[in-house]
């Protein structure tokens, strides 16, 4: 087991945002967490990343208990999040952003990792000296993903990578997710685009109002009547 | 003409000190959105350190300067750790009030320790150099050179080093920076250390220029540097440099036309005008409140 979350409860002040969430990710899997806007998907990810402190529950990553640990320490264990809305450093260049991604890594493998990211996203190589704020939305998403990959994640958590992108770009981003998976990466994918997410996922969890209401393989959930009704427009 | 040139150098000299101090304001604001009103008083502590090192302990001036810079740096880091770190998630107003409190603490503490009177010493760098009818003090030349070197070093630090880049990342997006594995505590401490070291350099240059130290010397200097930082665009490093030199030159210009007594008023009028017309300053980024 790579990641296991047990009975997680998170509050924003008095608001009970995440209620008794348990989930796990095995090595090599793509697991997706789907749900409507405001269901608490990002809250779950941000708690796993250490940006939010849970009220109770346990988060275990490999042999580290990372519950309530500082976010920078969690990144060092190889548990890395690519945040919602991309959040690239807009006033820094593409390459500087990628350097920040490699912040916790020793310098030795920097060039190799950079080359790898540029192979995945040739567009970024073309724009390496450009200030990131001037990139298009799709390029910024590539940069955010490339930046996360620079830290050599053992588990990559992607928060809404398709948000605000044109359909063609969404396809492209999902192609990249698939190719990362094929190359052996483990991915926890949070998505509102349930259709796309369930297609690529090995397993999936459905989050509703902070609670996990359904889980199963991607195919099972795609066939589920309630998922179809609520998320797949069927 | 000669009056103009010598006033130009005067302006660049005071502007150098303002710029160094403004940099500390701007860097700290850039990273934790705090107007660190205790920043000016760090200069005062630096000046007293250099003053007593030379007069009471008869240390070599160079050693005294190093001591002043080190003391300022440590003081800045300690203030951040003791007073600001516990308030990191508190409302910004609490942080601002704390900064003002620290400022009072330092000023009154200095008064208690060193007395309320102004301490004077001999000029550190005596002498002038003349070019035709223009006379420029060695102090002015030294001040400008030291300030420019410090600014070039700072620019390289912020643009080229890993810690400098981390600083920029934190100031752009604290949450995303943490997701890169950047330690907030370390980066913020580093920012205070660099800002305070610049203030320490500023304090020594001030001592060179005026040969005196008093418990409240940091408050007016700090306020003017704050105006410089706002004029340049608070949060912007090149902005603070430009703002500092602009305020210094402006003061010299006001003095040159015979309105010396209006110097301070003009500086604060600039603050009002900037806040009314272009609150983001010359180089600043328009404020976008992050959700």
Image (spheres, rainbow, N blue to C red):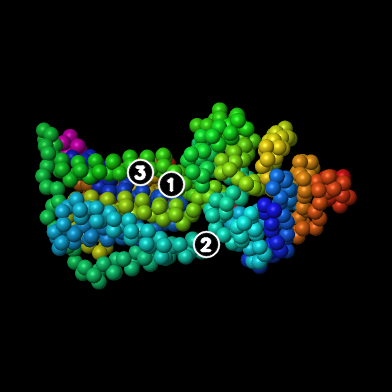
Which of discs 1 and 2 lies nearer the camera? The answer is: 1
Q: Is residue B40 visible?
A: no
Residue at image point 71% right, 63% down: A7
Would you name the residue on which mark 1 appears?
Answer: B163
Q: Which mark is residue B154?
A: 3
**How far, Cα to Cα, is label 1 from label 2?**
23 Å
Establish whether labels 2 and 3 are both on one chain.
yes
Q: Give the chain letter at badge 3.
A: B
Looking at the rendered structure, the secondary structure element under dot 2 is: loop
Looking at the rendered structure, the secondary structure element under dot 1 is: helix
Q: Is residue B62 visible?
A: yes
Report the predominant secondary structure element of the magenta stretch: helix
Q: x, y percentage for residue B22? A: 35, 50
Query: Which callout, 2 or 3, points at the residue further toward the start of the chain?
Result: 2
Would you name the residue on which mark 2 appears?
Answer: B89
Q: Is residue A174 left or right of residue B223?
A: right
Establish whether labels 3 and 1 are both on one chain.
yes
Which of discs 3 and 1 lies nearer the camera? The answer is: 1
Q: x, y percentage for residue B25? A: 38, 52
Identify the image quadrant of the N terminus of chain B.
top left
Residue at image point 41% right, 65% down: B82
Establish whether labels 1 and 2 are both on one chain.
yes
Q: Are marks 2 and 3 in contact (CB under 8 Å)?
A: no
**How far, Cα to Cα, is label 2 from label 3?**
29 Å
**Residue B170, placed above or below residue B40:** above
Q: Are marks 3 and 1 in contact (CB under 8 Å)?
A: no
Magenta-tinted stretch:
B1-5
Crowdedness near tag 3: few (<14), some (14–19) or many (≥20) residues, C-alpha within 10 Å: some
Query: Which callout, 1 or 2, points at the residue further toward the start of the chain?
Result: 2
Q: Is residue A66 left or right of residue B191?
A: right
């Amino acid at each position: 087991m790579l990641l296991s979350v047990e009975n997680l409860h998170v509050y924003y002040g008095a608001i009970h945002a995440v209620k008794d969430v348990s989930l796990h990710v095995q090595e090599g899997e793509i697991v997706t967490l789907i749900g409507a806007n405001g269901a608490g998907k990002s809250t779950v990810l941000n708690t796993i990343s250490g940006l939010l402190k849970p009220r109770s529950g346990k988060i275990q990553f490999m042999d580290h208990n990372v519950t309530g640990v500082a976010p920078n320490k969690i990144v060092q264990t190889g548990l890395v999040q690519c945040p919602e809305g991309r959040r690239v450093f807009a006033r820094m260049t593409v390459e500087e952003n990628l350097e920040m991604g490699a912040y916790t890594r020793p310098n030795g493998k920097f060039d190799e990792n950079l080359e790898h990211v540029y192979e995945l996203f040739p567009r970024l190589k073309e724009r390496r000296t450009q200030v990131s704020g001037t990139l298009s939305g799709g390029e910024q998403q590539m940069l955010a993903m490339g930046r996360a990959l620079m830290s050599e994640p053992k588990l990559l958590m992607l928060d809404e990578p398709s948000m605000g992108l044109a359909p063609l770009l969404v396809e492209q981003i999902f192609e990249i997710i698939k190719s990362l998976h094929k190359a052996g990466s483990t991915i926890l994918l949070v998505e509102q685009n349930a259709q796309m997410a369930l297609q690529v996922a090995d397993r999936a969890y459905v989050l509703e109002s902070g609670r996990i209401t359904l889980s199963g393989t991607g195919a099972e959930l795609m066939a589920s009547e309630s998922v179809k009704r609520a998320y797949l427009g069927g | 003409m000669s009056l103009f040139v010598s006033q130009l150098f005067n302006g660049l000299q005071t502007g150098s000190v303002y710029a160094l101090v403004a940099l500390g304001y701007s860097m700290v604001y850039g990273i934790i959105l705090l107007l660190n009103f205790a920043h000016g008083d760090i200069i005062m502590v630096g000046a007293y350190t250099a003053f007593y090192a030379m007069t009471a302990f008869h240390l070599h001036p160079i050693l005294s300067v190093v001591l002043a810079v080190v003391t300022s740096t440590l003081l800045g880091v300690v203030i951040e750790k003791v007073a600001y770190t516990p308030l990191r998630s508190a409302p910004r107003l609490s942080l601002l009030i704390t900064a003002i409190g620290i400022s009072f603490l330092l000023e009154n503490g200095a008064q208690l320790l060193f007395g309320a009177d102004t301490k004077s010493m001999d000029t550190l760098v005596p002498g002038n150099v003349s070019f035709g009818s223009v006379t420029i003090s060695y102090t002015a030349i030294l001040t400008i050179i030291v300030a420019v070197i410090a600014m070039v070093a700072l620019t390289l630090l912020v643009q080229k080093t890993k810690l400098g880049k981390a600083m920029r990342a934190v100031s752009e997006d604290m949450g995303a920076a943490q997701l890169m594995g950047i330690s907030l505590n370390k980066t913020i401490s580093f920012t205070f250390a660099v800002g305070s070291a610049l203030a320490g350099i500023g304090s020594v240059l001030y001592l060179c220029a005026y040969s005196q130290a008093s418990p409240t010397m940091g408050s007016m200097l700090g306020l003017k540097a704050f105006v410089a930082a706002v004029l340049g665009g608070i949060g912007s490093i090149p902005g603070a440099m430009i703002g500092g030199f602009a305020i210094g030159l402006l003061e010299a210009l006001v003095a040159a036309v015979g309105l010396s007594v209006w110097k301070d008023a003009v500086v604060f009028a600039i603050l009002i005008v900037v806040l009314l017309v272009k609150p983001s300053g010359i180089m600043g980024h328009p404020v976008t409140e992050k959700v």
